[in-house]
Amino acid sequence: MAESLAYRAAYTVFLGDTVYLLHVFHKKSKKGIRMPRQDIEIIRQRLREAEKLEAAKRE
């Protein structure tokens, strides 16, 4: 049986004049849409990093 190649890349943010891609993941679950808490934490951390980069560009 072929492995599913469904990917999601919906976690982006536009800060200043830059679009940051915060998270891409391989959809594994065949049911439900809930994202694992670990993935949510990764997105939050990367958003903070993107905000710091954007702030540094303005200094």
Image: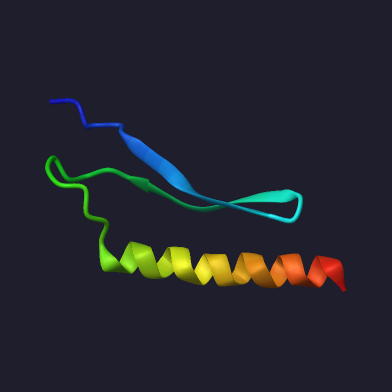
Which residue is painted at 31% across and 33% down in the image? 6
Quadrant where the N terminus is found in the figure: top left
> Hey, which residue is sitting farthest top in the picture?
1
23 is higher (above) or lower (below) than 9: below
- Residue drawn at x 45%, y 63% as measured from the top left: 43
Quadrant of the rendering where the C terminus is positioned: bottom right
The x and y percentages for residue 56 are: 79, 72
Q: How is the image coloured?
A: rainbow
> In the image, is 22 to the left or to the right of 18?
left
At horizontal 76% and vertical 50% (from top left) the residue drawn is 17
Residue 15 occupies quadrant: bottom right
Q: Where is residue 22? Give x, y as percent.
A: 52, 56
Residue 31 point in image, percent of width and height: 12, 43
Q: In the visual, does 41 lie left or right of 47?
A: left
* Residue at image location 65% in from the left, 68% down from the top: 51
Residue projecting furthest to the right:
59
Q: Is residue 45 left or right of residue 56?
A: left
Q: Is residue 27 left or right of residue 24?
A: left
Total number of numbered discs in the rendering = 0
Asked whether 22 or 17 is in front, the reply is 17
Q: Quadrant of residue 49?
A: bottom right
